[in-house]
Image (cartoon, rainbow, N blue to C red):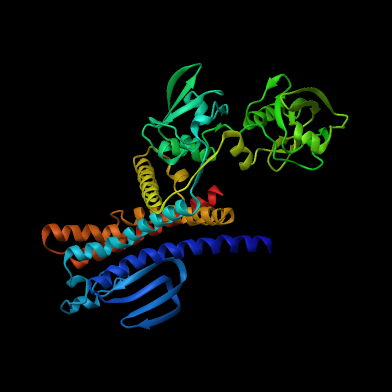
Amino acid sequence: MEFALEILSYVFWVIVAIMILVFVHEMGHYAFAKLFKMRVDRFSIGFPPKIVGKKIGNTEYVIGATPLGGYVKIAGMVDESMDTDFLQSQPQPWEFRAKPVWQRMIVITAGVIFNMLLAWVVFASLKFAHGEDYVPAENISGVYVQEGSIAHQMGMRTGDRPIAAAGRPLVRKSDLDGVEALMADPMTITVVRDGQEMTLRGPSDIMTQLNRRGFSLGISADPPLISAVQEDSPAAEAGLRPGDRVLALATDTVRFWAEMTDRIQALEGAPVRVRWARPDSLVSELGEITTSAAELVGQRGGVHIYEAEIEPTYHEATESYLLGLMGPSSEMIAREFGQQHRSFSIGGAITAGFSETWMNSRAIVTSLKRIVTGRENVRENLGGPVMIAKVTKEAAEAGGSVFWRIVALLSITLAIMNILPIPALDGGHLVFLIYEGITRREPSVRVRMVMQQIGMFLILILMTFLIFNDILKL
């Protein structure tokens, strides 16, 4: 029963996202067809069989039972329905084929334009409503670099201070592994080490490498602050509490949370002496540690310093050794690094929304280009309906802002994919219209029908590949 509810949750959220994207896309075709006085026979969200429909004027508005797309059927247009009966009569003034080429080109591309506009509106609205919280890059004095990670292979080392990515000075901490930095060609990171600047170059197949490593460069600046302690865990029995800061494992100083977790794994369950600091205010609240395992080893700078020997436990589900500690919360990180908040005016939000739409569009196009040219692995970088459902559900669980951000990114992806010059897609129709505009004559109906069928066949093959590929990656 629980598994069935989980599946329904995935299905529900992906349907919501697809319905939004399809409605906006088809509304673009519909709106400009109406503007140019073309007759729209059907506006459908979802494919047949029909669940419900209502005819208003000349248009039937339909909701289909197959929520994987939609369509606008415009009179006098050869489309995916393969309906060519209208070709037996002379063009009528309300038909698609009777309108100037430039009008038909606008109608065909309007769906893509509306999808891009949706992304722009979403990004701008999020900026205006919530502003932007960020950690200034200058507040990061150094980072931890996981051994064997992409950053480590590039030449980065623990303690390096990143100052630029893709040749641009870092303004925010998030700029280091942001879309713009990762999509640069070549992808580079400039760091300061021992007072010297050095620029390090990333792998040419950066997206494939990231996918294989959980989309992480292996860089972290999070401090070893404890936000929670699992009940009855080795750490709890030793006396550690939320708000403590780990200072050292054995004789090795600890500066980063990821550094501590990696060292614990390297011990493979062997007991380790842990030193931690507790603010005097927390000592006053909780009292002195009275467990036999811990001992007070010093007091300085408003903190009590404790030590205890702790034996990690093995967690089979994650195949890792644990003390029972949870890393710093977002509030802790904000206090540690002096997080700042930026509000946006309406004009500023519109500009920021456009910049984010443009940046993500470039990233998607660049990623597709790398896949097509063989620089990136196809199987590891393309996602289909199953992965979209997974990402959409996770976004919905994370909150409205995250969900709408995913909707905006999917809208950009839909727009770019639709404008590709593949028959049966908007881009394929646009190619025929460009040909007509240049040669002053339409491609033959036979050619268009054959190309449409080829396009539908290719799309079917691609969708089948993506679905099976998604399942294999789960």
Q: Which of 434 and 158 is in front in this view?
A: 158
> Does 320 sit left or right of 450 as displayed?
right
> Does 153 sit left or right of 327 as displayed?
left
Residue 421 visible? yes
Asked if 128 appears above or below 178 in the picture, the reply is below
Q: Position of residue 297 (x, y in %)?
A: 80, 22
Q: Where is residue 428 in the image (x, y as percent from the top left)?
A: 27, 58
Residue 240 visible? no
Q: In which quarter of the image is residue 241?
A: top right
Asked if 393 appears above or below 226 in the picture, the reply is below
**Residue lying at 57% horizontally and 31% vertically, measured from the top left:** 221
How many numbered discs sit on the rendered protein?
Answer: 0
> Does 329 sit left or right of 57 as displayed?
right
Instruction: Please state, as top left, top right, bottom left or bottom right, where the N terminus lies in the image.
Output: bottom right
**Residue lying at 55% horizontally and 64% vertically, measured from the top left:** 12
Q: Nearer the viewer, residue 6 or 457?
A: 6
> Does 425 sit left or right of 305 as displayed?
left
Q: Nearer the viewer, residue 398 or 73?
A: 398
Q: In which quarter of the image is residue 29?
A: bottom left
